[in-house]
Image (spheres, rainbow, N blue to C red):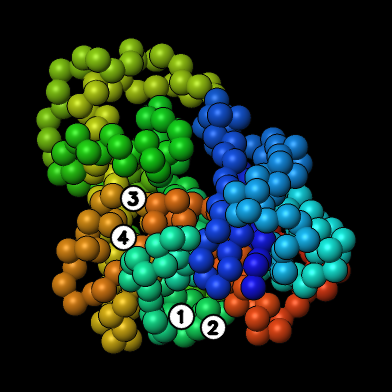
Amino acid sequence: MKVLGIETSCDECAAAVVENGVVLSNVVATQIPFHAKYQGVVPEIASRMHTRWIYGVVDRALKDAGLKPHDVEGLAVTAHPGLLGSLLVGLHFGKAFAWARDIPYIAVDHLLAHLYASRLRRAGAEEEGVYPDYPFLGLLVSGGHSAICRADDFDDITVLGTTIDDAVGEAFDKVAKFYGLGYPGGAAIDRLAQTGDSGAFKFPMPNLYKKGRDGKDHPYDFSYSGLKTAVVNQLEQFRVKKPEIPGGGRRQGEPLRGGAVSPALSGGEAADIAASFQKTAVEILLRGLFRAAADTGITTVVAGGGVAANSYLRSRLAGQGGLRTIFPPPELCGDNGAMVAGIGERYLLRGDRSALSETASARVRAFRRSYP
């Protein structure tokens, strides 16, 4: 079944075509240049750019797959979670396309699509890679969501642990913005950390043993607000390595883009902060993941989301004995239409359909824990 997938949940305008789990095309138009000067995504700009680009991105995806609009047999589009304005652009375009062509369409969950990305294959390389069987533990890590879950099928997900405050990708972005390390923050910190000393700072890891509002313990939950505060406001309290003599860094008080004031950092110290922060941020995730693996007995881990491209996370899991870890290829880690088309194909082949009255939703409660 040839399925067109549309993804506009945040600042990536994406479309792809998948047939029988094989990616025939995958087009992603990034808005990074439009948001870089703000060091973060501006929702109004994001939705306007989606409106401008959506037709051209879909047209390019169809042409790359060698298809005409009448060749498409089904359509899948992200309906939640994400930025509401951005979601509505893709959802309404998708519904209009499906209605005009009189083909079935399905509105899908962006987070379930991320977990499905590892099951996709590239055209001409159908036998490559290792594809996960169910059940497996899912590690969802992105700028908006962080969660550990058990997957018993493509749409049968049980959330075991999640963040009680910030997502891991959000913490990367905010630390990078404060120190002027670059945008997007996750990729910038990952690059800079390659030359840094991860032992230069020993940042704290949170202990989460108090009960949630449901009265239950949540041993797989995690938190990033404390780490973010430590890196941004309490840096010297956690320094292990003496700082180098400043040189090559910014002058103290030099303004950053967006009006923040830059701390005085040498190139080496910036790299040390990046490496130490990245190590702690990833270890917080892995502590909960390893607990979940031990308690459930499930030894296959599937990662999804933009932070799944992080080199330290990949190397740590690759070296973890007893666990089989599967990552999607880098182009399928971030937001993309292929993952939406792929999981959409599964729904459509099963006979599931969405009504034209379907609307978008900014949040999915199951992926964010509330504590007293």
* CA–CA distance in space, label 4 to label 2: 26 Å
* CA–CA distance in space, label 3 to label 4: 14 Å
What residue did someone put label 3 on? 310
Q: Which mark is residue 284?
A: 4
Q: Position of residue 92 (x, y in %)?
A: 81, 56
What residue did someone put label 1 on? 151
Q: Earlier in the sequence, mark 1 or mark 3?
A: 1
Q: Secondary structure at mark 3?
A: loop
Vertical placement of residue 139 versus 281, above or below: below
What residue did someone put label 2 on? 156
Q: Position of residue 112 (x, y in %)?
A: 55, 70
Question: Which quadrant of the structure image shows residue 258?
Answer: top right
Q: Are marks 2 and 3 in contact (CB under 8 Å)?
A: no
* CA–CA distance in space, label 1 to label 4: 21 Å
Q: Nearer the viewer, residue 196 or 119?
A: 119
Task: Residue type at mark 2: give it.
Answer: Asp
* CA–CA distance in space, label 1 to label 3: 22 Å
* CA–CA distance in space, label 1 to label 2: 6 Å
Q: Earlier in the sequence, mark 4 or mark 2?
A: 2
Task: Residue type at mark 1: give it.
Answer: Ala
Q: Are marks 1 and 2 in contact (CB under 8 Å)?
A: yes
